[in-house]
């Protein structure tokens, strides 16, 4: 157990960390990065209570090769965009920095860090859910946290983008699920529900599909379904209650709420089978670049695919971005360290963690997940449970008792 002063220090650090993480659309992202790098610096020059095992060594070796290949592919370009390239390469390094940050941390620190995360998740999901309903009713309240386009509404929180908001909610929720040491189904039922509602109101199709995939895997991996079945029924009752409450509080404006929700759902579903918000056009261009031998092997260079696209949008596919910008060699290099993590989870029979990891990989099909801070935190959590297998064993045994 942590002593009083040290516990307070951990709490303050965790609050600052998550505040900067979830408010990156309000504050410059450099503040978050500065805090992360400073924390790693202090840990490296402090007392190491974690274990530096082969998982970290393999990740460092593979990522080093990946970054060197990216530098070579960039040099081969006639007029490379160096600013975009440096930012992209830095974002690929962040998972390693995050993994070091957690792996050298004590279990006491991680426990405090994750408990604070749970409170942040619950608070912001509750707050943004209410904000979304108020804005959908026709009023204006914290209007900048709602994304408006073509008559539909999507929740983007303080992230500046509905997709980034969904990624941050989903990946940080998975971090919380993997690392919390005490599992109380009763006390965490609200978190389970409201995070899913928050992701749904962001209307990120990749995130919604990933969440459904995650829940299906949880059902498949565990034989006793009573808790999950009750949770599903509770969620349905909750959604029904939400609409009844909306009807009560906004009697003169309920049609606006239902109309805007239905318009958003209809648009997102129809767009998924037509253009995918421009994604299909972007993905079609990938084949043109891969037709050249040098591009197929080492790619067009980190961050350079975005500048070459005729569509003013991001790639929205982590795998497509990897193979175009880093070629076949870079793609397999990067995927190899992710495969190594999955191998560690399989060999240690961490089924709960496997479900979470696979769901993130599914999520990555529809968004540039590999270049987000949420993905970095999730990778760091995976490394931590591998390095500290005892914590994961304790978590699984408590979960088994509950179900």
Image (cartoon, helix red, strand yellow):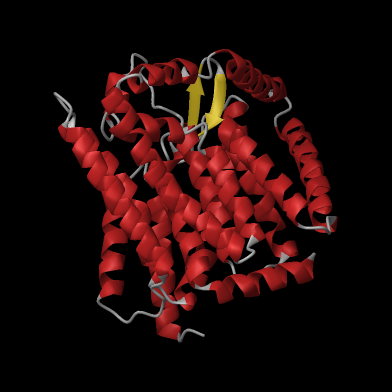
Q: Is residue 260 visible?
A: yes
Percent position of residue 232, x then y: 79, 47
Within the image, what quadrant is residue 245 found in? top right
Q: Position of residue 109 (x, y in %)?
A: 45, 74
Residue 373 in the image, given as x and y percentages of width and height: 40, 48
The residue at 36%/29% (across/down) is 324
Nearer-the-camera pick, 31 or 284 = 284
Residue drawn at x 82%, y 58% as measured from the top left:
223
Instruction: Give the image quarter of residue 196.
Output: top right
Q: Residue at x 65, y 54 (%)?
A: 191
Image quadrant occupied by the C terminus: bottom right
In the rendered structure, the answer to whether residue 220 lies left or right of residue 64 reads: right
Counting labels gives 0
- Please indicate, yes or no, whether residue 28 appears anywhere in the rendered image: no
Query: What's the residue at 59%, 64% (across, down)?
Result: 347
- Residue 333 lies, with reference to residue 301, above or below; the image says below
Q: Position of residue 121 (x, y in %)?
A: 55, 53
Vertical placement of residue 53 versus 368, above or below: below
Q: Is residue 33 left or right of residue 334?
A: left
Q: Which residue is the extreme one toward the front?
A: 293
Q: Is residue 260 left or right of residue 102?
A: right
């Amino acid at each position: 157990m942590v002593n009083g002063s040290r516990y307070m220090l951990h709490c303050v650090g965790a609050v600052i960390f998550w505040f900067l993480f979830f408010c990156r659309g309000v504050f410059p992202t450099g503040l978050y990065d500065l805090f992360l790098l400073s924390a790693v610096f202090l840990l490296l020059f402090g007392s190491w209570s974690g274990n530096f095992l082969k998982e970290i060594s393999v990740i460092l070796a593979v990522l080093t090769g990946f970054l060197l290949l990216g530098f070579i592919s960039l040099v081969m370009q006639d007029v490379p965009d160096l600013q975009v390239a440096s930012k992209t390469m830095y974002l690929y390094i962040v998972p390693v920095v995050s993994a070091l940050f957690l792996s050298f941390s004590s279990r006491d620190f991680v426990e405090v860090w994750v408990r604070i995360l749970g409170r942040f998740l619950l608070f912001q999901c509750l707050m943004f859910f209410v904000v979304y309903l108020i804005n959908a009713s026709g009023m204006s309240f914290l209007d900048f946290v709602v994304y408006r386009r073509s008559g539909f509404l999507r929740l983007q929180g303080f992230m500046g983008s509905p997709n980034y908001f969904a990624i941050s909610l989903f990946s940080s929720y998975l971090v919380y699920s993997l690392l919390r040491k005490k599992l109380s189904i009763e006390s965490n039922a609200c978190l389970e529900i409201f995070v899913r509602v928050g992701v749904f109101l962001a209307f990120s199709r990749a995130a919604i599909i990933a969440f459904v995939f995650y829940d299906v895997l949880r059902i498949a991996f565990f034989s006793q379904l009573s808790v999950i079945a009750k949770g599903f029924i509770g969620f349905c009752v909750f959604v029904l209650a939400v609409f009844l409450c909306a009807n009560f509080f906004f009697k003169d404006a309920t049609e606006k709420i239902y109309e805007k929700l239905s318009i958003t759902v209809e648009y997102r579903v129809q767009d998924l089978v037509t253009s995918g918000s421009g994604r299909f056009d972007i993905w079609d261009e990938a084949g043109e670049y891969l037709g050249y031998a040098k591009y197929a092997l080492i790619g067009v260079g980190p961050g350079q695919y975005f500048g070459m696209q005729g569509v003013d949008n991001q790639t929205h596919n982590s795998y497509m971005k990897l193979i175009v910008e880093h070629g076949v060699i870079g793609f397999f290099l990067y995927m190899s360290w992710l495969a190594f993590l999955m191998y560690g989870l399989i060999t240690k029979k961490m089924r709960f963690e496997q479900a979470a990891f696979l769901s993130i990989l599914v999520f990555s099909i529809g968004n540039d997940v590999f270049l987000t801070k949420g993905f970095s935190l999730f990778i760091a959590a995976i490394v931590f449970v591998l390095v500290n297998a005892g914590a994961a064993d304790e978590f699984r045994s408590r979960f088994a008792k509950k179900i």
